[in-house]
Image: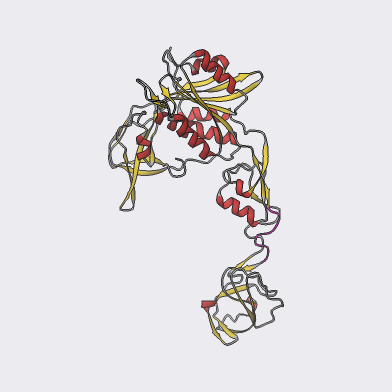
Amino acid sequence: MTEAATSVADARARILACCPAISGDETVGLHDALGRVLAIDLLSPIDVPAHDNSAMDGYAFRHADLDTRGDTALDVIGSALAGRPWHGELGPGQAVRIMTGAVIPQGADTVVAQEEVCAEGTRIGVRPGVAKGMNVRLAGEDVARGRIALPAGRQLRPADIGLAASLGVSTLRVFRRLRVGLLSTGDELMSLGEAPREGGIYDSNRYTLGSMLARLGCDVVDLGIARDDRDALSAALGAAVGDVDALITSGGVSAGDADHVRHLLAELGAVEFWKIAMKPGRPMAFGRLSRDGRNTLLFGLPGNPVASMISFLFIVRDGLLRLMGVSPLPELPRFQAITDQTLRKPPGRTEYQRGIMSLRNGQWHVSVTGSQSSGILRSMCEADCIIELGNDLTRIDAGDPVQIIPFSGLL
């Protein structure tokens, strides 16, 4: 009996169930923290801002002094600059000239923008209707002392690095980098620099997948090319166990005579699944390699270049992020666009077609890149999005909405 293919949703769920966060962390400086995953909550050691301060250039005063029936005249008795506070206490009918970021003078509770007053010499006129507390940024308004500024599990972005710096924090505790091995399989594969030969193709998968792993924030271990020899491949897989946290292979997961990865995974560990109801990327093995009490997760991707990239994006990526300690997992951005062509597919599988987005009359449109063969890597270079056709869809007519996932930030 033919084994049923696993749905995309079920494959992702089963992978995530096998991917606990890695153990081990380290302390890094802020310049080295981008893309790393916080191992512990970052608690703010200070209030940000540290003092009540002005949100704009204007005049600080006591709101209780305002006349609700007409303009209020106030005497300007000093000025406060950012980093150079005005020392004193405001009395009734007084105001202080204040610049953006300057500390609110003692006794003041409201700031009016300079363009909203009538100034004449050392007196200003303030119109009624100014709300109490206007243009005042309160101490701790951004981050309060002792509160979580950045939660554990967050993959750090540039704004996060800046926030940590604004707290006076110079180092962060992060998970160690996930160590991922890359192994290409196939007698037809040639290494870069090797002279062309009949029937040979240059291995591109280690470079595309390696770049995707690096962008994800992993340490990549290039394990080279393994030939279609069962013993040699078994030795390569066994050597990776315990040396890497996860191993990604490409090729050797179909049902051909020379496709050994799936069978060796069953012998050296356990297979969770090896077929997914998707195109491209149907033949994909996932499981665990075991040796001498150590374990390594194996993601056996198809050998066709586009299929390996699509499988990585929609099946493998979340599992690796979970291993890295990222929590919660980020959702891939999806939105609707109008398809310029009629799209067809059989039911019972999810299809990922390469598309090109365009904005016309305020509406996003998408067209396919041409041939959707999983061996045409150029189509991934031409595309800027993926068109996702769900499991039950069979046809989407030109002019109808379809769901797309943009490449921006992913590829």
Of all residues shown, which one is farthest toward the bottom?
121
**Near-viewer residue (266 or 25):** 25
Q: Is residue 41 above or below residue 73?
A: above
Whether residue 295 sits left or right of residue 409 in the image: it is right
Tell me which residue sits at (66%, 72%) in the image. 84
Q: x%, y% of residue 401?
A: 34, 42
**Near-viewer residue (129 or 29):** 29
Span colored in magenta: 44-51
Quadrant that contains the N terminus: top left
Q: x%, y% of residue 257?
A: 42, 12
Q: x%, y% of residue 339?
A: 31, 41
Q: Is residue 49 above or below residue 64?
A: above
Q: Image quarter for residue 366?
A: top left
Whether residue 264 sits left or right of residue 199 in the image: it is right
Q: Main secondary structure of the magenta part?
A: loop
Residue 28: tell me if it is visible. yes
Q: x%, y% of residue 374?
A: 37, 29
Colour style of the rendered protein structure: secondary structure
Tell me which residue sits at (68%, 65%) in the image. 51
**Near-viewer residue (281 or 129):** 281
